Every structure is written in structure tokens, then in C-alpha cells.
Image: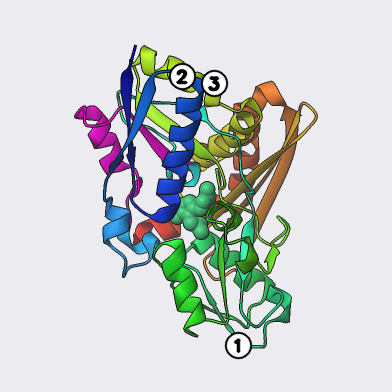
Amino acid sequence: MSRILRIATRSSPLAIWQAEYVQRRLEALHEGLSVELVRIKTQGDKILDTPLAKIGGKGLFVKELEQAMMDGRADIAVHSMKDVPMELPEGMALPVICEREDPRDAFVSNHHDALSALPEGACVGTSSLRRQAQVLANRPDLKVSSLRGNVQTRLGKLDSGDFDAIILAAAGLKRLEMHDRIRYEMPPEESLPAVGQGAVGIECRAGDEPVQALLAPLNDPLTWDRVSAERAMNRRLEGGCQVPIAGFALLEGDTLWLRGLVASESGDTVLRAEARAPREQAAALGVRVAESLLEQGAERILAELYQRS
Ligand SMILES: NCc1[nH]cc(CCC(=O)O)c1CC(=O)O
């Protein structure tokens, strides 16, 4: 029996890599299944001159892909979990998260070995408020400027001398075989990663059981539990991916260890919380860490940000 499954994907090289990874795995698992890519431009890809936080709105990189599934132009969508809002639209499901790549941020520079080694007043490129806040908390003397575009575009801007260093997800660089651009992987103590960073998720129509059965073997239960804890924290904070929130869970045996952070854009205020719980209690753990951040004043920081956007 031959069947066709269509994957909605963005058309950046990293998005294509992720979609082709899912395509390869599904075709290897299911004899006779043919998997095709449907390339789609999203809002996040079209508006390149504005920092993400200023465009506002959640799901800038996923909405058009969801629309394609609702219209029947595609059956599944492959996303970076970092870009997926905490609440899915009615009728959509996210049944699978694949094994996580390196979740850390990568320090990329042509002339400097580390954030701590940058000369005073040096310029760091990133459009992530989360990265900006942590850079400035470590090095208040540095200048942070906006850097948008796909991974290749961002590296091009570094090479042409616009910045002394930039920060990118290590996962993207590794997937695109650009490991050699990474000066070092920033430890979570220096740059706590974004919720879901490094993990690829697969979305489909909620009632589509035949498709969910095809996808099920791609789920990685360890990644699933870690990302579930991170996303439960973000959901309780009502945070999207465009706010200075970090959340990073590790498994120590069957115990989840979740660290969370909420910061002001300037890096002047950095709130941190962490907790441990059994794997089965990922969601409760996320809520606990979020509430600890809220008690410390996260609400005020986030409210100020949302007001402006
Ligand atoms: N917001 C863009 C985005 N979404 C996912 C990744 C990286 C790959 C990943 O986290 O899996 C990136 C680029 C970056 O942060 O450097």
C-alpha cells in the first residue's frame, strides 16, 4: 500500500533540515510511505527588519503552517519547540517531540574566545530579549544590538564586522554542520536556554489518528518530559518565546531538575528559581518554578513588557 504524507515547513535551511529529518525517519519506519515537503512563508520569515519582541503576537513562525493543516494542504508540521506557543489552536495536537539536540546557546565570534574576554563596550548581536538580558547581567558594559534573519544571514552579519560576537542556538549550528563556528557552548549558569530550545516537535490535526499512529515512534519520552516541565512553567508565566524568560530541565535518573529565569531587558533584574520532582510530575514542577518566580516579582517585569508591545 502506498501513502503520501505532507509536511508543512518554513523554508529556512534549518527548518528544511528539521523537516527532512522527520521525512527520513518516517520513510525508514514505514514501508511504502512517501513523505513530501510543503514550503510555506510565515510572518516571522517575512518581517526581517523588526526585533521579534516588537512585532508582537505569539506563534509568528507557526500560524501559517497550522492554517495549511486546517485547509488540508498538509498533514503535519515540523517546528522548533522554541517557536511553538503554549496553547495550540482548537483542533490541533502536538503528539510528538523528537530527541533533543544540544539545548545550549552558542557564543560565536571571529576574534574573541568568550563573553568574559570581550573588550569593554564590545557589541553583541542578538534579537532575543532572553539572551540580551543574560549578556547584560554578566557584562553591563557591553552593547547589544538587534540581529534577525536565518542562521546564515546572522553569520554573514558577524563576518562583515557588524558585531564583535553573536549568540545563536547551538542546535541550529550543529544541524547545519557549522559546529566549527561555535567558540563555546554557554553553560546554563551563564545563559539559561529558552523553553524547548534544541527540540523538534510535530503538530497535526487533533482527530487524525492514522497520522498520529505513524508519528508515535518518533517521540522521545525523555525529551518529552523535560520540555513538558519547561512549557508548564512558561504557561503559568503566560510567556511566549519573545520575552526574557528562560527554562531548562535536565533528567537525573527519574528526577527532573528544572531551572527558570525571568529578567528585565536591561539585565538589571534577574530572577531565578529551581526545583526537582519525579518525572511523572513535570507539569506540577513547571508550575512550582513559575510560582516561585512570580513571588519574587516576575509579574511586574512581564506586565511592563506586555504593556509596551
Ligand atoms: N527563534 C528562531 C529559532 N528557533 C529555533 C532556533 C534554533 C534551533 C532550536 O532551538 O531548535 C532558532 C534560531 C536561534 O535561536 O538561533
Instruction: Give the secondary structure at mark 1.
Output: loop
Tell me the CA gap for discs 3 and 2: 10 Å
The one of 26 and 45 positioned closer to us in this rendering: 26
Side of 113 relative to 234 (left or right)? right
Kind of residue sitting beneath label 1: Gly
**270 in relation to 19, above or below:** below
Q: Earlier in the sequence, mark 1 or mark 2?
A: 2
For the point 50% across and 77% down, which residue is it? Answer: 158
Do we see residue 145 in this rendering? Answer: no
The one of 36 and 1 positioned closer to us in this rendering: 1
The one of 17 and 71 positioned closer to us in this rendering: 17
Instruction: Identify the image quadrant of residue 132.
Output: bottom right
**141 in relation to 243, above or below:** below
Q: Is residue 59 magenta?
A: yes
Disc 1, disc 3: CB below 8 Å?
Answer: no
Disc 3, disc 2: CB below 8 Å?
Answer: no
Q: Which residues are magenta?
A: 56-80
x, y percent for residue 146: 43, 73
Kind of residue sitting beneath label 3: Pro
Residue identified by numbered label 1: 121
Q: Which residue is at the far right?
A: 253
Kind of residue sitting beneath label 2: His
Q: Earlier in the sequence, mark 1 or mark 3?
A: 1
Residue identified by numbered label 3: 217
Instruction: Give the secondary structure at mark 3.
Output: helix
User: Which label was assigned to residue 30?
Assistant: 2
x, y percent for residue 177: 57, 57
In the rendered image, which quarter contains the N terminus?
top left
Side of 189 relative to 208 (left or right)? right
